[in-house]
Image (cartoon, rainbow, N blue to C red):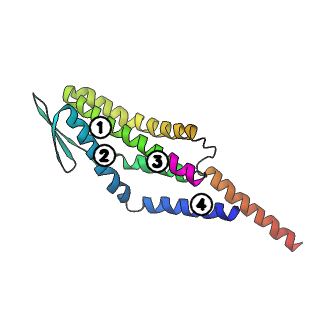
Amino acid sequence: MVKSSFMSIIIRYSLLLLLGLGSLWFLNLIITPLTIGLTYYILGLFVSSSLSGVSINLLFSDSSLTIILVDACIAVSAYYLLIILNLSTPMSSKKRVKSLSFTLLAFYLFNVLRIVIFSLILHVNFNLFVSLHLFFWYIMSFLVVSGLWFLTVKLFSIDNIPFFDDIKLLFSAIHSKKRKIKKRTK
């Protein structure tokens, strides 16, 4: 049991390290085209649009607008934070896959919806766009990610604490090992 727990810790934290190397390029490689694609599709339901790389050109009846989806819009670091919370929490593999899938999909849909709504607001009222964008940037991003994590914990009955329970297990194993060594030396 303890050996499998140690192996789980090694695998989980190695995955986190590998994903984090190189400025999250692997996550960016997957999430960016998915986000741009779905955003473009949904915006196309409301307004005539065209796509060029990371830019979506919106053609309204009275004007045109170009939305450039920079890395901050894609929010790869938020996905990584959700992955960190998941992989740093001890749980069964089945629960991990389900909870991680739910969390990442929910954030993906939220983020695309946010971009679509902000794009439409930008056309109507630039000042409102700027205010909402800053509000989301500084306050709501934290609340959304943490709220989504707490929802995931509730929905999937996750009863362990990220990092803490792994550290507790490691300290307990070290303490137990020290006691065994002391008994042998007496």
Q: Is residue 185 left or right of residue 159?
A: right
Judged from the image, the secondary structure of the residue bearing numbered disc 3 is helix
Looking at the rendered structure, the kind of residue marked 4 is Ile
Q: Earlier in the sequence, mark 2 or mark 4?
A: 4
**Mark 1–mark 3 contact, CB under 8 Å?**
no
Q: Residue at x 85, y 72 (%)?
A: 184
- Residue 178 position (above or below residue 102): below
Q: Residue 115: which disc? A: 1
Query: Do tag 4 and tag 3 residues touch (Cβ < 8 Å)?
Result: no
Label 1 – label 2 distance at C-alpha: 9 Å
> Is residue 94 located in the magenta-colored stretch of the structure?
yes
3D distance between C-alphas at marks 4 and 3: 20 Å
Q: Magenta region's main secondary structure? A: helix
Q: Nearer the viewer, mark 2 or mark 4?
A: 2
Instruction: Find out whether the residues at labels 4 and 1 contact each other: C-beta distance under 8 Å.
Output: no
Position of residue 45 measured from the top left corner of the image (x, y, whole percent): 22, 34
Under circle 4, the secondary element is helix
Mark number, residue 101 = 3
Q: Which range of residues does the magenta coloring cover?
A: 91-99
Query: Can you say whether 22 is above or below 56 in the image?
Result: below
Three-letter amino acid code at the position of disc 1:
Ile
How far from the left and from the top, in percent, is residue 87?
53, 53
Return the residue at label 2: 35
